[in-house]
Amino acid sequence: MFSVKVHRVGGEVMVACCDADMLGRMLGDGKLMVHVSERFYGGETVDEDGFLELADEASVVNIIGDRAVDAAVRRGLVDGESVLEVCGVKHAQVYKV
């Protein structure tokens, strides 16, 4: 399951998605800190199909969590070679132009 929040700014739609069990966690390695905040990622809990339907309609997608990123790669939304790791957790951003 995934936590997904849709942000609408002007005419743009951004979908923020994380693995549901990542919500609220702080990732850090001493140099880098990332907060998987409920304010940004917390919204509705959806399955993989629900996440990908929302992502297909978004102009920007921000994804953190191994399962969520893997789902986006399988769908072809993210190139597997573009995936970053933040403190050992997969992260990807998609910008549709």
Image (spheres, rainbow, N blue to C red):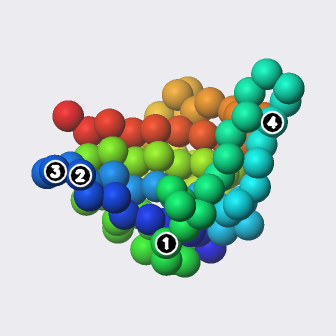
When the figure is inspected, residue 33 is found, relative to residue 52, above or below; the finding is above
Q: Is residue 32 left or right of residue 3?
A: right
Distance from Cα at disc 2 to Cα at disc 3: 4 Å
User: Dot 2 lies on which element?
Assistant: strand
Q: Residue 3 location in percent, x, y? A: 56, 68
Q: Amino acid at mark 4?
A: Gly
- The quarter of the picture where residue 21 lies is bottom right
Distance from Cα at disc 1 to Cα at disc 4: 23 Å
User: Dot 3 lies on which element?
Assistant: loop
Distance from Cα at disc 1 to Cα at disc 3: 20 Å
Q: Which residue is mark 4?
A: 28
In percent of the image, x 68 and y 40: which residue is there?
Answer: 34
Contact (Cβ within 8 Å) of mark 2 with mark 3: yes
Q: Is residue 56 left or right of residue 71?
A: left
User: Dot 1 lies on which element?
Assistant: loop
Q: Which residue is mark 2?
A: 9
Q: Residue 5 location in percent, x, y? A: 44, 65
- The quarter of the picture where residue 22 lies is bottom right
Name of the residue lying farthest toward the top: 31
Of labels 1 and 3, earlier in sequence is 3
In percent of the image, x 55 and y 67: which residue is there?
Answer: 42
Name of the residue lying farthest toward the left: 11
Q: Amino acid at mark 1?
A: Gly
Q: Which residue is mark 1?
A: 43
Of labels 2 and 1, earlier in sequence is 2
